[in-house]
Amino acid sequence: MKSSFLAWILRMPLIKRWALMHCVKKENIAEHSHQVAVIAHMLAVIRNTYFNGQLIPERAATIALYHECSETKLQDINHVTKYHNPELTREFKKLEELAEIDCVNTLPVELRDSFRSLIVQSEVDREYKQLVKAADLISAYLKAQDELRFNNDEFTHVKIRLGQMLEAYRQQMPEVRYFLETFNDLCFVSVDRLSAEDNH
């Protein structure tokens, strides 16, 4: 059996994020997934190091790499559209799960069980799913801040909305608070300033 699984994954760079918005810096779901994987890995390490966690950081990163797999079939769906009302949200979630299952089913049968709990979001362990969701929000929040840095006011309300959503994660997950306090600010300075900071 020949499998199309990798072929779909390799198309992730073709799928644009923020499709309904003007962006100073373009972003695709491959770039986004990589960033979410890095952040999820860091959050897991922070939890284990400072807050008595027992997560496997590499598993968190792998789940994050695959968390947008459904978009290889469905494209990126604008957040406001997706969550406009509960009925729409339910239908979009059904579509996403069908797309995730379809992705898994492109694999050889013997490999599918190993991938289901990474790709089908309803089967991802709850603790890892929450961590990856936090990483996903942080990634989007960083994007909004970056666009605002270049005076793109389309992201003004995005930053406010994401900031409000992140506040709940700050309260529930101390690693999110630690991450934002430690890493957020220097993501928006010049390379000269970064070099100066590193030499302190």
Image (tube, rainbow, N blue to C red):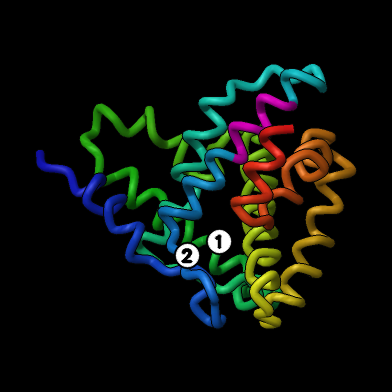
**Left or right, 133 with reference to 21:** right
**Left or right, 170 with reference to 80:** right
Secondary structure of the magenta portion, mostly?
Answer: helix
Which is nearer the N-term, disc 2 or disc 1?
A: 2
Indicate the position of residue 157 as horizontal and vertical percent values: 76, 77
Q: Mark number for residue 27?
A: 2
CA–CA distance in space, label 2 to label 1: 23 Å
The answer to whether residue 39 is seen in the rendering is: yes
Residue 83 occupies which quadrant of the picture? Answer: bottom right
In percent of the image, x 65 and y 45: which residue is there?
194
Instruction: Write down the residue under mark 1.
Output: 93
Indicate the position of residue 159 as horizontal and vertical percent values: 75, 68
Circle 2 or circle 1, nearest the eye: 2
Q: Residue furthest right?
A: 171
Q: Residue furthest left?
A: 1
Q: Secondary structure at mark 2?
A: loop
Indicate the position of residue 75 as horizontal and vertical percent values: 41, 68
Q: Mark number for residue 23?
A: none
Residues drawn in magenta: 39-46
Q: Secondary structure at mark 1?
A: helix
